[in-house]
């Protein structure tokens, strides 16, 4: 149960960060990597 709560909290914060980055046209995006974590990518950078 605790891991489900942690996962949901992390997803909420990542969603918030994605919206903020998009809103300020930062040229950076956050990619989810299943069973690993997250990766920051500059626009035009391959996944």
Image: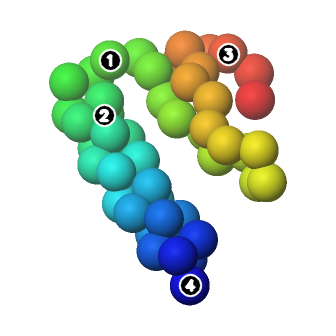
Marks 3 and 4: in contact by CB < 8 Å?
A: no
Q: CA distance from mark 3 to mark 2?
A: 16 Å
Q: Residues within 10 Å of mark 1 (few under 14, many from 20)?
A: few
Q: Earlier in the sequence, mark 1 or mark 3?
A: 1
Question: Mark 4 and mark 1 in contact (Cβ < 8 Å)?
Answer: no
Which mark, residue 26?
1
Query: Residue 19: where, in percent of width, then height?
Result: 29, 44
Q: Nearer the viewer, mark 1 or mark 4?
A: 4
Q: Element type at marker 1?
A: loop
| Residue at image point 41% right, 17% down | 27
For the residue pair 10 and 2, the one nearer the viewer reads as 2
Whether residue 27 is situated above or below residue 1 in the rendered picture:
above
Say whether disc 3 or disc 2 marks the residue closer to the N-terminus: 2
Residues at marks 2 and 1 touching, judged by CB atoms closer than 8 Å: yes
Residues packed near mark 3 inside 10 Å, few (<14), some (14 to 19) or many (20 plus): few
Q: Position of residue 37 (x, y in %)?
A: 67, 43
Q: Judging from the image, what secondary structure is the residue with disc 2 in? A: helix
Give the number of the mark in front: 4 or 2.
Answer: 4
Tag 2 residue: 22
Residue at image location 48% in from the left, 65% down from the top: 6
Q: How is the image coloured?
A: rainbow
Q: What residue is disc 4 on?
A: 1
Q: In the rendered image, which quarter is residue 1 located in?
A: bottom right
Would you name the residue on which mark 3 appears? 45
Measured in 3D between alpha carbons, the distance from the residue under mark 4 to the one under mark 2, in whole angstroms, is 32 Å
Q: Are marks 4 and 2 in contact (CB under 8 Å)?
A: no
């Amino acid at each position: 149960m605790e891991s489900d709560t942690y996962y949901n909290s992390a997803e909420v914060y990542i969603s918030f960060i994605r919206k903020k980055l998009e809103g300020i046209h930062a040229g950076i995006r956050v990619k989810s990597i299943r069973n690993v974590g997250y990766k920051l990518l500059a626009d035009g950078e391959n996944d």
